[in-house]
Amino acid sequence: MGIFVMISKRWKGMPAVSALVYLLSATVVSFAAESRPALELNHPSVPYFNANSLDQPRLEAVLTRNGVVVEDLRYDPFTGNMEMAPAVFKAFIDTGASGFTISHLHAEPNEYTEAVFLDFKPEDVLGQYTNLGLGGEEVGDVIGQFGLRIRNGPVDPFGMAGDFLEEFLPYESGFDLWLRQAPGVGEVNEVDLGGGMVYQLVSPVNIIGMPVIEQRVMVMRWERNEFLEALFPEIREMHTFLLGHEDPAIPETNVTLDLEMRDFVGEPDPGEVNPTTSRNPLLRDVTISHDPERDSVTGNWLFDTGAGASFISFDWARTIGLIPEEFENLEAFVVEHTANEGIISQVGGIGPNTVTVPVLELNEIRIPAREGFDLVWRNVKILVFEHPELAALELEGIFGMNLVGPAVTIDANVLEGVNVSDPTLLLTFFDDITPSPFSSMVFEVTGEETAELRLFADRELPAAHTSISFAAWRESQFGADASDDAVSGPLADPGNFGLPNLLRYGFAMDGLQPQRDHLPALTWAAAPADDTSGDGPVLVFQRFRNTTGVDYRVEFSPDLEGWQPVEDVTWEVSPLDAERETVTARVMDPVPPNGGFFRVVVEKVD
C-alpha cells in the first residue's frame, strides 16, 4: 500500500508540487537505514579496537576417575618435599569448543616435568577422532570416561590450588575427552636467553568447552589490579566463574545480545568415535561494513571465548571492500600485504600448522541489543581467514575476546627474532592498550537452541526504544475491536478518511483521526554541500521508532499507470520525539523532463 504525490516540471527546472494524494497497492523491498539508536563502544581517547586480547577466561580443574580425583607428585615450595596431591591443570573455558582438549604434555610423566601427569591408562582410550581447527585437521585419542571438578576465580600463582579441593565444584561425570597425540603449536618453545643459553618454556593448552559451560552460567569480570594498573592504566584483570543459574553473585548487566545454539559436530569418520560434545553459541545478526560504496554483510558469528582475536572470512572481506576483489585467494593478498609492511598474525590452535593471516582495520561491527539499540565497534583490527571446511559450516565470522576485554595488536613480523633477554620490544605493544568497554559479561544457555550474552557497559545507554508491531499498534488503538478485521485490519478504514490502518501504522498515525499532516511530504531540495548530483525531490515522513513488520519503498510513474522502483535513494533517519522518528528519502535518480509522480509504498511483511 502506498502514497504518491505528483510533480510537474516548470521552465528553469523548478518543480511545482501538487497536493493530489492517492492510495494505491504495491509490492516493496526494504531499505537499509540505521534507524536504531547506537551505543558506540570505542573509548573516548582510543578511536579503534586492537586485535589481540590480553587474556582469555581460564580456570583450574581436576579430573576424576570413578569418582576419585586423579593425583600426581607435586613439589611443595613451603616444605621443600615432593608429595602426592590432586593433579590440578589450567584450562581455557571456551564457548567456541564443542568438547574438550587435553594437552599431550599431561600424558608424558618424564619428558615435561613442568606439566602435571594425568596418569592416562591404555584402557582409557576409546578410539580416535579427527578434530578441525584453523590450523587444519588433527587426529587425537578419545579417552573416557572422566568426571571434572572446577575451581572458580583467579588461578593460584603458586600451584597449590589442590590444597583447597573443597573449592572445586563437581560436574556430571562420564565425559569422553579428546587427548592430543603430540604437543600442539606453541605448547613447547625454546627461548634464546642469549650467551648460548636456551630455556624450554612449557605451556600446556587445555580446553573445557560447552558440555561443561552449558551446565552453569559463565561470568567474566574485569576488575582493577593496583599492581597492573600502576604499569598499564588501561588494564583490568579478568576473573572467571561458572555459577549456578540462580546464584546471587551473577553480576548486574544492562545490555543483552541474543544467540542461537548450533551443532557443528556430525557423525565421526569411519573407524572413529566422537568425544563428548555440545552445541556452540552464535551471536545473531552481526553486521560488518567497510566501504560506503559496497554492501554490508550480516550473519551469525561464533561467540568464541577461546579466541583472543576476531575473524572474518576472505569472501566477506572481499564483499565489503576490505580486500580488493582482484585477489583470488588470501595467500596472494598476504604476500602483497606483507611486502607493503602490513600487520600479520600467525594463527595456530587445533591442527598441526600455523597460518599466516593479515590484520586489517574494519570500519564497523554492529550487533542489535535486545534493549532496542545497536552495539557498535568502530575501526576494529580484525584477522581474515580462508578455510573451506569452516565455510562449508557457514562459519564466516568469529567474535573473539579482543572486542570485550583489554587488547593490544601484535605484529608477527616484529616478533621474529625477539628473545626474553631483550623485552623492550615486547613491552612496546603494551604502550597501546584498548580498554575493555565492559566491566562484566554473562553467558547463559537458555534453551536447546537459544542462549544470551549479557553485558554491563559503564556508560550512559541510548534511549531504549522498544519495537512496535502492527499487532501492538492495533491493540492500543482499537481495544475490544482489535480482533475485528473489518475495523482494525490492515486494509480497514474505520474513520472513512481514505487512510487504511496499515498506512496509519506505517506513518505513526492515530487509528481514528485524520492526521493528514503525518502523510509524506514532497519538496524540491538542494543537494548537500558534499554531493555533486544536483538538486532533486525529497520525500519526508514519520514513523514509530523501531517500527517492525513493514517495509518502505519509493516508486515513480510518469502517468499513474506503470510504476518503477527508484533505485538510487539515500535514506536518513533522525529522532522526532520519544516515540517517533523522521525519515528523509532523497531521490538521486534524474527526474524525467515531463515530470511525473512519486509514491511512498508501505507493505506489511512477516
Image (cartoon, rainbow, N blue to C red):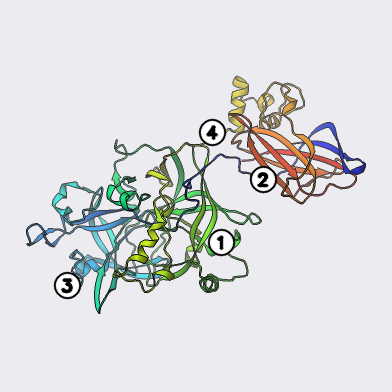
Question: Marks 4 and 1: CB-CB under 8 Å?
Answer: no
Specify the quadrant of the image occupied by residue 439: top left
Q: Give the residue number, with chain letter if any, for mark 3.
A: 110
Measure how far apart labels 4 and 1 are at the Cα level: 33 Å
Measure how far apart labels 2 and 4 are at the Cα level: 20 Å
Q: Crowding near pointer 1: few (<14 within 10 Å), some, many (20+)?
A: many
Residue sitting at x 37%, y 36%: 252
How far across and down, in percent of the image, does residue 277 sit? 35, 57
Q: Earlier in the sequence, mark 2 or mark 1?
A: 2
Q: Earlier in the sequence, mark 3 or mark 2?
A: 2
Measure how far apart labels 3 and 2 are at the Cα level: 65 Å
Q: Considering only vertical position in the picture, is 587 above or below 330?
A: above
On the question of residue 478 being in view, the answer is yes
Q: Earlier in the sequence, mark 2 or mark 4?
A: 2
Q: Crowding near pointer 2: few (<14 within 10 Å), some, many (20+)?
A: few
How far across and down, in percent of the image, does residue 206 sit? 29, 61
Disc number placed over residue 31 in the picture, else none? 2
Q: In the image, is 298 to the left or to the right of 271?
A: right
Q: Give the residue number, with chain letter if any, for mark 1.
A: 317
Q: Earlier in the sequence, mark 4 or mark 3?
A: 3
